[in-house]
Amino acid sequence: MLLGISGCSAGTAQSDATPSVKSSSKDMTPSPDRTAPAAATDKVTCDTYSDMLTILHNTDYSFYHNAIGPQERTGWYDLAFRVIGRAPSVGDGPVATALAALKQVHPPMSTSASTQDPTSVAWGKASLALAAACEAEGHQAGATGFVGG
C-alpha cells in the first residue's frame, strides 16, 4: 500500500456554522456496467478505494494536528464512506467480494450519527482485505497525503 505525506502549513480559516450547500440524500450510486469486463470494473473499484483512503488519511492528519474539529472529521468520514459506497462491483471475484465485505462493516449511506470509526478492528480487516484483493489483481491502492507542513 502506498502512503505519502506532503503539503504546506497554512493558517486556520473561520467558517460560518451554516453550510452554504445543502446535502442531498438522493442515492447517486451508479449502476454497475454488467457488460464491462470484471478487470475494468476492479480497476475503478480500486481507484475509488484509493480515493477513500486519501480522504481518511488527510482527515486524520488534519484532525490530529488540530486543523479540524470532531464535527468536520465526522463530515469527512461520511464523505469517504459515501465514496466507497459508490464503488462499482461486478461478478464475484476477489475485489468484488472484498468490497462487499467492506460495505457490510459500514453501510455507505448511513447518517453521521452512526459513522463507523475507520480505526476499528472490523473496518481495518475489511479494508486490508480489499487492498490485498486490489494488489492481487494488479491494481495498487493507497492514500495520497496533501495536507501538513
Image: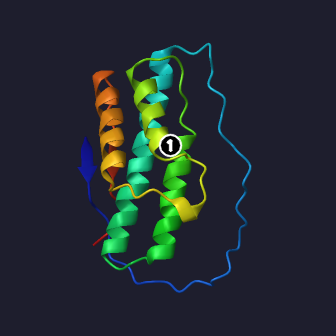
Residue at x-position 50% and y-position 43%: 84
**In the displayed structure image, the side of residue 101 where residue 64 appears, left or right:** left
Q: How is the image coloured?
A: rainbow
**In the displayed structure image, the side of residue 86 where residue 128 appears, left or right:** left
Residue at x-position 62% and y-position 25%: 32
53 and 9: which is toward the camera: 53
Q: In the rendered image, which quarter contains the N terminus?
A: top left
Residue 147 visible to the viewer = no
Label 1 neighbour load within 10 Å: few <14, some 14-19, many 20+: many
Q: How many marks?
A: 1
Residue at x-position 35% and y-position 41%: 127
Residue at x-position 32% and y-position 67%: 61
Residue 126 visible to the viewer = yes
Q: In the rendered image, which quarter contains the C terminus?
A: bottom left
Q: Quadrant of residue 112?
A: bottom right
Residue 10, image x, y percentages: 38, 79
- From what the image shows, is residue 145 above or below residue 34? below
Residue 141, image x, y percentages: 33, 38
Residue 75, image x, y percentages: 53, 65
- From what the image shows, is residue 126 above or below residue 109? above
132 and 19: which is toward the camera: 132
2 and 56: which is toward the camera: 56
Residue 64, image x, y percentages: 31, 73
Query: What residue type is disc 1 on?
Result: Ile
- From what the image shows, is residue 140 above or below residue 78? above
Location of mark 1 (residue): 84
Mark 1, secondary structure of its residue: helix
